[in-house]
Image: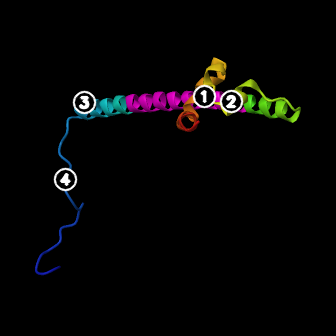
């Protein structure tokens, strides 16, 4: 007995509303469908992200291999034509295969050095 009230034995809280069993099952099925759809979208997004990262890794590996070749050529006393072109500021002589990556990375520096010359 609390503050003059008599407690009744039984469950506490709200009583669940009488819900039609078929409607409850249908809501559950719909919720499961939506969950599977969200999961599918999430996996598609992650697969696209992984493939884009793999492409970036391949491009960086190719660039690294090019730099390794340049270093080995310079160790033998040869200066690759791409480096000569960068040093002289002649970007037109650079082969198109490596010009795109360097021009994008050195765009500010090469234009500034060409303006100073």
Report the mark closest to the observer, 3 or 1. 1
- Tell me where the magenta segment starts and ends, as one range: 36-64
Nearest to N terminus: mark 2 or mark 3 = 3
Report the mark closest to the observer, 1 or 4. 1
Q: Please provide percent x and percent y for residue 37.
A: 38, 28
Residue receiving disc 4: 15
Mark 2–mark 3 Cα distance, whole angstroms, equals 62 Å
Location of the N terminus (image quadrant): bottom left
Nearest to N terminus: mark 3 or mark 1 = 3
Q: Please provide percent x and percent y for residue 93.
A: 66, 20
Residue receiving disc 2: 63
Q: Residue at x 44, y 33 (%)?
A: 42
Q: Residue at x 68, y 27 (%)?
A: 85
Nearest to N terminus: mark 2 or mark 4 = 4
Furthest-right residue in this view: 76
Q: Residue at x 17, y 71 (%)?
A: 7
User: Local crowd at mark 1 within 10 Å, few (<14), some, or many (≥20)?
Assistant: few
Report the mark closest to the observer, 2 or 4. 2
Nearest to N terminus: mark 4 or mark 3 = 4
Horizontal placement of 69 versus 54: left or right? right
Residue 53 in magenta stretch = yes
Mark 2–mark 4 Cα distance, whole angstroms, equals 68 Å
**SS type, badge 3:** helix
User: Local crowd at mark 2 within 10 Å, few (<14), some, or many (≥20)?
Assistant: some
Marks 1 and 4 in Cβ contact (< 8 Å):
no
Residue 9 in magenta stretch = no
Marks 1 and 2 in Cβ contact (< 8 Å):
yes
Is 57 or 63 nearer to us in this picture? 63
Residue receiving disc 1: 101
> Which quadrant of the figure has residue 65?
top right
């Amino acid at each position: 007995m609390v503050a003059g009230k008599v407690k009744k034995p039984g469950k506490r809280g709200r009583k669940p509303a009488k819900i039609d069993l078929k409607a409850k099952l249908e809501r559950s099925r719909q919720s499961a469908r939506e969950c599977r759809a969200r999961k599918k979208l999430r996996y598609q997004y992650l697969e696209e992200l992984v493939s884009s990262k793999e492409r970036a890794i391949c491009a960086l590996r190719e660039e690294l291999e090019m730099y390794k070749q340049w270093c080995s050529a310079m160790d033998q006393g040869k200066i690759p034509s791409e480096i000569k072109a960068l040093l002289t500021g002649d970007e037109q002589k650079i082969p198109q295969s490596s010009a795109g990556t360097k021009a994008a990375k050195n765009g500010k520096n090469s234009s500034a050095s060409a303006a100073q010359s």
